[in-house]
């Protein structure tokens, strides 16, 4: 197997998994919305609390919003829009890889390609509209884009380190359940997200789940202003298998720059017959490229089995609510083999009124 092939293919495929890691931020800022559901028992806010309980709630959402206000809960405005920056660094495991050429039979190269630690770093910019359908249930959609950078350490058949960067888009749907007792709130978030990475045949799905428990610290002078802090656990599961095809010209854009055909031939001779046939097909096309023969119509087919090295990690975060319209949130992912940082600006509004 040519060195450039390993470098491009492995970095390229692993990057699709790395971008899936950005889905962790979906649940980070979705669950954080939960702290808006706070029951004011502070006597300093008696007048404000009484005004909530006497309010004639005329808006469509959330359903049962009037009942929540009657009980003294200061629920968030139902409609929201979030603008988010997210970055994450995590280790990825590659367990199995099959390769083929131009739609032909594929062979398992798992025993002949060995990786060291593979680190994926994601940078994402996203937009998330959301709606509190019920005082305790938030539904949201996700759309965004960004880049992934993957540091690949190949140990066998040749040793080298390389880094690949790819652009990607993402879309998803999710729901958050939340509740509060006094200033203490609990949130459980679940979502599905699909990452659409450059040159990947189809979007890759991921499932995310998180539980957070937090405490709301109310302002002593303004009942609409508060600071909320929380801690929790984040879990992620991505689709383990991925199929696709990469044009040969994308893998070897500079076929003649330093490729050692003879050493590749020697390596191919050590492989079992099925792997040797495919490796020689790739080397033959590479050799033709070095000789000036066009190979644009050749593609490398792959099947990749992958997983995140650590599906669980802890999260800690905080939100400052300026008023019921504007909120600024941040969160850190700590421990395990994943680290993450999020910054989120959220705007909320009341929306539609009921028709009588």
Image (tube, helix red, strand yellow):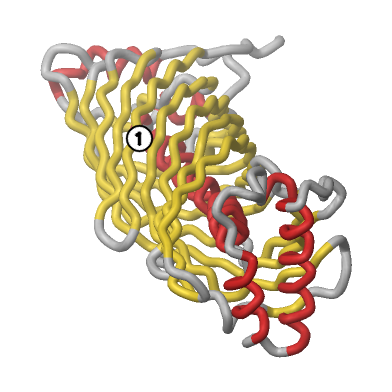
Q: Secondary structure at mark 1?
A: strand
Residue at (44, 16) in percent of width and height: 347
User: For mark 1, does the 10 Å Cα neighbourhood hold few (<14), some (14 to 19), or many (20 or more) residues?
Assistant: many
Tally the marks: 1
Q: Is residue 301 left or right of residue 213?
A: right
Look at the picture and state if 166 lies above or below 223: below
Which of these two is toward me, 228 or 81? 81
Residue 99 place in picture, x, y as percent: 72, 69
- Please state the horizontal and vertical placement of residue 120, each as a whole percent of the image: 43, 51
Q: Quadrant of residue 288?
A: bottom right
18 in relation to 243, above or below? above
The N terminus lies in quadrant: bottom right
The residue sitting at 63% across, 44% down in the picture is 254
Task: Say which residue appears at 38% left-offset and 26% top-offset.
Answer: 344
Q: Compared with residue 352, is residue 202 higher up or lower down, i.e. above or below?
A: below
Extreme residue toward the front, this view: 291
Q: Tell me the residue that label 1 is attached to.
A: 342
In this view, the residue in front, 260 or 114, is: 260
Foreground residue among 58 and 345: 345
Decide if residue 182 is in sight here. Answer: no
- Rendered residue at 71%/67% (across/down): 303
Please tell me in which quadrant of the rendered image residue 356 appears.
top right
Q: Is residue 345 above or below residue 285?
A: above
Tell me: 215 left or right of 11: left
Could you say where residue 102 lies in the image, as x and y percent from the top left?
Answer: 86, 61
Task: Report if residue 270 is visible in the image.
Answer: yes
- Residue 229 vs residue 312: left or right? left
x and y, in percent, of residue 275 in the image: 72, 81
């Amino acid at each position: 197997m040519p060195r450039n092939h390993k470098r491009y293919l492995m970095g390229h495929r692993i990057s699709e998994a790395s971008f899936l890691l950005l889905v962790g931020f979906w649940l980070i800022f979705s669950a954080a919305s939960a702290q808006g559901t706070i029951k004011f028992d502070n006597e300093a806010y008696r007048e404000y609390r009484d005004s909530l309980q006497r309010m004639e709630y005329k808006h469509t959402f959330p359903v049962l919003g009037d009942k929540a206000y009657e009980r003294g809960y200061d629920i968030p405005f139902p409609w929201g829009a979030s603008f988010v920056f997210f970055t994450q660094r995590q280790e990825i495991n590659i367990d199995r890889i099959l390769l083929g050429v131009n739609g032909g039979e594929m062979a398992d190269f798992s025993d002949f390609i060995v990786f060291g630690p593979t680190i994926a770093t994601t940078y994402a910019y996203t937009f998330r509209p959301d709606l509190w359908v019920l005082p305790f249930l938030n539904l949201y959609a996700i759309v965004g884009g960004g880049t992934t950078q993957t540091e690949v350490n190949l140990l066998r058949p040749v040793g080298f380190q390389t880094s690949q960067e790819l652009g990607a888009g993402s879309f998803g749907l999710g729901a958050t359940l939340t509740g509060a007792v006094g200033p203490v709130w609990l949130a459980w978030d679940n979502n599905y997200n699909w990452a659409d990475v450059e040159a990947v045949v189809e979007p890759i799905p991921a499932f995310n789940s998180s539980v957070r428990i937090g405490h709301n610290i109310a302002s002593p002078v303004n009942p609409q202003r508060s600071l909320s802090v929380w801690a929790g656990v984040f879990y992620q599961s991505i689709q383990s298998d991925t199929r696709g095809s990469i044009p040969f010209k994308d893998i070897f854009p500079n076929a003649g720059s330093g490729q050692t055909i003879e050493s590749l031939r020697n390596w191919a001779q050590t492989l079992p017959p099925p792997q040797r046939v495919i490796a020689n097909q790739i080397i033959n096309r590479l050799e033709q490229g070095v000789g000036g023969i066009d190979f644009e119509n050749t593609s490398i087919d792959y099947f990749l089995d992958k997983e995140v090295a650590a599906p669980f990690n802890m999260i800690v975060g905080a939100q400052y609510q300026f008023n019921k319209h504007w909120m600024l949130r941040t969160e850190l992912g700590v421990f395990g083999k994943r680290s993450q940082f999020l910054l989120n600006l959220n705007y909320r509004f009341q929306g539609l009124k009921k028709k009588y």
